[in-house]
Amino acid sequence: MKTSKFTAVVFGLLLLGGSPLRFSCQDVTEKRNDFVSQISQKRIDRYFQDIIRLSPRPPESEIFRKCRAYLTNTLKSFSLNVWEESFTASTPKGAIQMANVVAEKKGHSDRIIYLGSHIDTKIIDGIEIQGANDSGSSTAALLELAGVISGQETRFTYRFVFFDGEESIGINMNENDGLYGSKEHVLRLQANKLISNVHAMILLDMIGDKSPAINRDLNSSPELYALFAACCQRLGYTDLCAGTSSYMYDDHVPFLQAGIPSIDLIDFDYGPNNSFWHTEKDTAENVSIKSIFRLVQTVACMLESFEEKQDN
Ligand SMILES: [Zn+2]
């Protein structure tokens, strides 16, 4: 839908003097969307504390089911359309029941922007991994984005996906072990012939380090990284895009393999030399809510940019 037509519709409604509108004509014509200023650090903190209380979350655990229920209820409170995608994953330890949580906000167009985070936590025998950063930080971030976007008039349709089974069941991730939820979701997109409707996929993972620096993932789409870097500049968060270059294998890969432009926003340097990753040090004390907040604002800036561009 083009700006001019949209403006005319809004102006018409104002003239009729009927329904109360959230924004003025001036807002619509000069500044269509302002997502960044609506991101709240306080809310992110609340979501994060809620998620920490529901940790750790190994697959098939009771606490994982409770976390899914918490996510579903919270997303429904934003008036989003929410569903669970249950499936059986074939893993090195046999069949495991898994479920993604998906929430959708319809826009004026059927073009879809995906935002994703995994919700499972890594299991390693003999180690208690709370998973505050991996995956509590990105799960809290995704809830905040869902809450803010759900209240907006948008051109794009937005899908927020909370993936199960990102972590491998064996020690190391490989082609056959890990990314279970994202692979399943992309299979369903293919079955429903929706791949060509997807405009972009933004994945968040491990975004709560106290000295955040998002990696330049060489698997991710360069144009999306350029947009991310431009938003870091706009917000004055240049440290955020100062991470090293590397190839990340994460839940964005099945989307990339299906031909969908995708980016993984991950800070794969958690604690000194990534020493907190997949250890008992991945706790709430080692996570900065401020870091999550700044990254969420940067993603909100990317979404504003998608909404403002007229050629999509
Ligand atoms: Zn992990």
Image: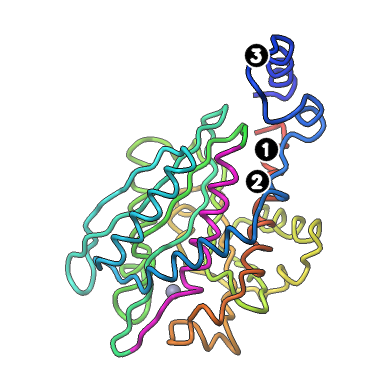
Q: Which residues are magenta?
A: 127-151
Vertical order, 248 against 77 (above or below): below
Report the Cα–Cα distance between label 1 and label 2.
6 Å
Point 70% across, 19% down: residue: 10
Q: Which residue is mark 3?
A: 18
Asked whether the beta carbons under mark 1 and mark 2 sit within 8 Å of each other, the answer is yes
The quadrant holding residue 129 is bottom left
Vertical order, 181 against 79 (above or below): below
Vertical order, 223 against 15 (above or below): below
| Percent x, y of residue 312 | 65, 33
Sort mark 3 into few (<14), some (14-19) or many (20+) by Cα contacts within 10 Å: few
User: Which SS class for mark 1?
Assistant: helix
| Percent x, y of residue 256 | 49, 54
Dot 2 or dot 3: first in sequence order is: 3
Residue 10 lies in the magenta-colored region: no
| Percent x, y of residue 107 | 55, 31
Report the Cα–Cα distance between label 3 and label 1.
26 Å
Q: Tell whether 46 sits left or right of 295.
A: left
- Please give the label number shown on residue 303: 2
> Which residue is more in the foreground, 230 or 79?
79
Protein image colouring: rainbow
